[in-house]
Image: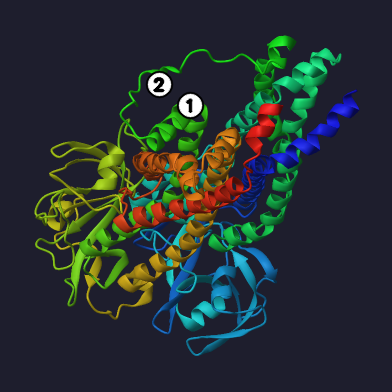
């Protein structure tokens, strides 16, 4: 008997194929995203940790006023590894910079991805992203200065996994900046280079004691912990964000699918109450009928999960290559994570089957007699319909409103589905608009073309440009993110190169102490507050009173008059360690810790926007598919439930256009409502997302949406709705006038 009953499954699914295909598409999307990001995040995280450990990633790097000569003694005393490293920037075509390092064999050891280590003086190792951007291969030759180098291989450095030119940069651009390693002999031939020191501390090492010891006989002029190094931090945070996406988005789509399938199945059961009652009368047991209807959920979940998991597996390698190109994490081992694959296949069934069981159980609680009579008939008008005064409305409007209030679950699912799809769509637009606004504000605040940072403190006046000072500090006490460093700038007032706006857009006077908005939010600081800070260079404690907050959204910084900062740090008058200029200055490279140009910043921003636009396209496609499935399935359900009504309207002489308007137009209001709800919801969601991101990054994202972005998003949703309406019209046109007579005869 069960075999006979199961033959009905294929026929029923074929009759209502649009609803079941829509459910399968949603499951495919969710399983594809789950498989893709679970394997991707696991491999990135594992390889990142292995790479950092095996290649001895630094805990900090620093510069000093005078060279250190007692490295071995310091290593033994303070339980650490310490290595001197030379570096200098070689420029090409005025737009491209290659930062060259001397070889490291104790800290920040290079990982050779392709080729071999340096064996000769004229050999060089390049980072793979830069080589790809410059169309270079292993074995090619490249000129640096007047010396030709042969590319021995491609390598990755543990402290340059996200290859930023400067710690203050936000985005990496491999077309404009890359890193390389050459031999020490080649360094002497090209340039002596600037010296810095990389430190890796043992678990029980006292970092503060080491810093104090160096400052007793020397002066630490720059110090950056790995926990505050954006070249390392950005990679770790990006992997965390991928791990977060692994669970949230697929589960949301699956929950949407559960609601959709439950409504579809309840509608199917309602049309088959008489058949179910007959099956009872023929001797079928309740568990056999239950098993039969549960098979619909099993089939939908199995087909969707297998196809989605397979597509996710196929997409792993291309996506992995994309992320490896985005930041340099070598893939040492590849783990396909069988447990994640198994969960991807089983998860839809684990969520879908229990929901389906509840729906079937609700129907099977009725007696066989009630089922054979078509189920329990509603004798009362619904609460919403009862309290709506529709007598004064035209028939068309009354019909549409009753369609909405007589099936509240279907109406709510329609609104929720459109809202969810619209939020996904607006997510990409919001990210792009907010980042554009943030960068425009940064460009308006900084008016220099070149920013030079020295590797030591200078006291002689600058002949060109405007001198400034910059030192790193950490917040003291129980403030949020107490480990995060920020910069305190000493600036001249007035300044030709720095214009900080207040909340009204007016220029703030630089004769007072000003904090940027990201740092104020991070430390929960208000105007007039005093913050306690610790110097990252010598661990001394200071207090700084904040006068104003600048509405600048990039950089965690405090600005004060340069002489006030020199007095606070007990430095000689006129001391500075940087210079802003509107033209390129001639400064020896061994005196510079870093050089930043406005053009570099603009180019890196453009490089970041390009992949974001591709991501926005992908998100828009997913949103389009979800919206199309939800609206189409709901439209199909409305048509199926009103099949007799549509047939009768045709008998009464209603034209096709009038029937289309009656049956299909009720969803128009729901689509508009769903999109309208998505706008404030995505603003709130992005606000929370940006706040969490700002806790670990030196910037604060303001949530901004352009009018055009909202309009374009609405047009895309309307196009999706229009496609669903067109398909619905075709279904209505296929309903014959005789269907009402056939229904009455049955």
Q: Quadrant of residue 110?
A: bottom right
Q: Is residue 181 above or below residue 727?
A: below
- Residue 225 can be seen in this image: no
Q: Is residue 693 left or right of residue 149?
A: left
Instruction: Identify the image quadrant of the N terminus.
Output: top right
State the CA–CA distance, disc 2 to disc 1. 9 Å
Q: Check disc 1: other Cα within 10 Å, few if <14, some if 14-19, many if 20+.
A: few
Q: How is the image coloured?
A: rainbow
Answer with mark 2 or mark 1, whichever residue precedes in sequence: 2
Observer-nearest residue: 613 or 624? Answer: 624
Residue 90 locus on image (x, y percent): 45, 78
Q: Is residue 695 left or right of residue 370?
A: left
Residue annotated with mark 2? 384
For the point 49% across and 44% down, the residue is 654
Observer-nearest residue: 569 or 596? Answer: 596
Residue 485 locus on image (x, y percent): 35, 46
Q: Is residue 185 above or below residue 196?
A: below
Could you tell me which secondary element the residue under label 2 belongs to? helix
Q: Mark 1 and mark 2 in contact (Cβ < 8 Å)?
A: yes
Residue furthest toward the front?
Answer: 652
- Residue 666 can be seen in this image: yes
**Which numbered disc, 2 or 1, marks the residue closer to the eye?**
2
For the point 16% across and 42% down, the residue is 546
Residue 32 locus on image (x, y percent): 65, 47
Q: Check disc 2: other Cα within 10 Å, few if <14, some if 14-19, many if 20+.
A: few
Q: Is residue 52 above or below residue 532?
A: below
For the point 26% across and 36% down, the residue is 524
Q: Is residue 636 above or below residue 87?
A: above
Observer-nearest residue: 554 or 99? Answer: 554
Residue annotated with mark 1? 408
Q: Quadrant of residue 588?
A: bottom left
Residue 234 locus on image (x, y percent): 47, 52
């Amino acid at each position: 008997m069960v075999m006979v009953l199961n033959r009905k499954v294929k026929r029923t699914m074929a009759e209502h194929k649009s609803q079941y295909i829509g459910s399968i598409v949603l499951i495919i999307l969710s399983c594809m995203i789950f498989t893709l990001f679970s394997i991707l995040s696991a491999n990135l995280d594992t390889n990142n940790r292995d790479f950092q450990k095996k290649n001895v990633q630094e805990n900090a790097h620093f510069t000093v006023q005078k060279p250190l000569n007692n490295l071995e003694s310091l290593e033994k005393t303070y339980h650490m590894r310490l290595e001197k490293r030379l570096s200098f920037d070689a420029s090409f075509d005025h737009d491209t910079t290659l930062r060259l390092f001397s070889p490291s064999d104790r800290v920040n050891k290079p990982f050779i991805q392709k080729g071999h280590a340096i064996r000769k003086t004229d050999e060089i190792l390049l980072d793979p992203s830069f080589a790809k951007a410059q169309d270079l291969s292993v074995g090619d030759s490249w000129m640096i200065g007047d010396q030709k180098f042969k590319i021995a291989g491609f390598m990755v450095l543990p402290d340059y996994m996200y290859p930023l030119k400067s710690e203050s940069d936000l985005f990496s651009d491999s077309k404009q900046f890359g890193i390389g390693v050459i031999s020490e002999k080649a360094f002497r031939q090209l340039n002596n280079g600037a010296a810095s020191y990389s430190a890796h501390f043992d678990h029980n090492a006292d970092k503060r004691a080491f810093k104090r010891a160096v400052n007793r006989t020397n002066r630490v002029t720059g110090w950056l912990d790995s926990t505050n190094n954006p070249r390392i931090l950005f990679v770790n945070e990006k992997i965390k964000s991928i791990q977060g996406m692994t669970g949230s988005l697929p589960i949301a789509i699956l929950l949407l699918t559960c609601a959709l399938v439950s409504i579809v199945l309840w509608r199917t059961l309602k049309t088959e109450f008489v058949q179910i009652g007959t099956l009872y009368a023929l001797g079928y047991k309740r568990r056999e009928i239950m098993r039969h209807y549960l098979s619909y959920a099993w089939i939908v979940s199995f087909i969707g999960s297998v196809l989605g998991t397979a597509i996710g597996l196929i997409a792993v390698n291309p996506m992995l290559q994309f992320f490896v190109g985005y930041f340099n994490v070598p893939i040492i081992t590849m783990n396909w994570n069988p447990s994640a694959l198994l969960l991807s296949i089983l998860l839809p069934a684990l969520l879908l089957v229990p929901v389906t069981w509840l729906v079937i159980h609700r129907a099977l609680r009725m007696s066989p007699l009630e089922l054979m009579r078509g189920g329990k008939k509603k004798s009362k008008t619904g609460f919403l319909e009862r309290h709506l005064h529709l007598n004064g409305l035209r028939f068309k409007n009354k019909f549409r409103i009753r369609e909405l209030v007589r099936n509240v679950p279907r109406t709510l699912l329609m609104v929720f589905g459109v809202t969810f799809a619209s939020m996904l769509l607006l997510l990409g637009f919001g990210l792009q608009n907010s980042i554009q606004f943030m960068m425009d504000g940064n460009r308006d605040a900084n008016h220099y073309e070149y920013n030079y940072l020295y590797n030591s403190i200078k006291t002689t006046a600058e002949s060109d440009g405007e001198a400034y000072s910059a030192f790193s500090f950490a917040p003291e006490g129980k403030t949020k993110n107490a480990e995060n460093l920020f910069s305190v700038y000493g600036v001249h007032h007035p300044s030709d190169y720095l214009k900080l706006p207040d909340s009204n857009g007016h220029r703030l006077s630089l004769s007072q102490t000003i904090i940027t908005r990201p740092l104020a939010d991070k430390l929960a600081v208000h105007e007039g507050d005093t913050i306690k800070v610790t110097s990252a260079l010598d661990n001394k404690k200071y207090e700084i009173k904040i006068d104003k907050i600048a509405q600048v959204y990039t950089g965690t910084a405090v600005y004060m008059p340069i002489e006030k900062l020199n007095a606070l740090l007990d430095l000689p008058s006129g001391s500075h360690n940087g210079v802003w200029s509107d033209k390129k200055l001639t400064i020896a490279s061994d005196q510079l810790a870093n050089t930043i140009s406005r053009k570099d910043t603009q180019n890196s921003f453009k490089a970041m926007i390009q992949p974001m636009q591709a991501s926005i396209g992908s998100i828009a496609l997913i949103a389009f598919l979800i919206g199309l499935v939800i609206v189409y399935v709901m439209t199909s359900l409305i048509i199926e439930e009103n099949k007799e009504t549509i047939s009768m309207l045709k008998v009464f002489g209603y034209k096709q256009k009038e029937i289309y308007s009656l049956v299909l137009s009720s969803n128009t209001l729901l689509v508009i409502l769903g999109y309208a709800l998505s706008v404030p919801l995505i603003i709130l969601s992005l606000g929370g997302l940006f706040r969490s991101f700002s806790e670990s990054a030196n910037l604060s994202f303001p949530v901004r949406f352009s009018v055009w972005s909202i309009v374009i998003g609405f047009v895309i949703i309307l196009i999706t709705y229009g496609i669903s309406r067109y398909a619905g019209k075709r279904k209505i046109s296929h309903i014959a006038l005789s269907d009402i007579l056939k229904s009455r005869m049955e």
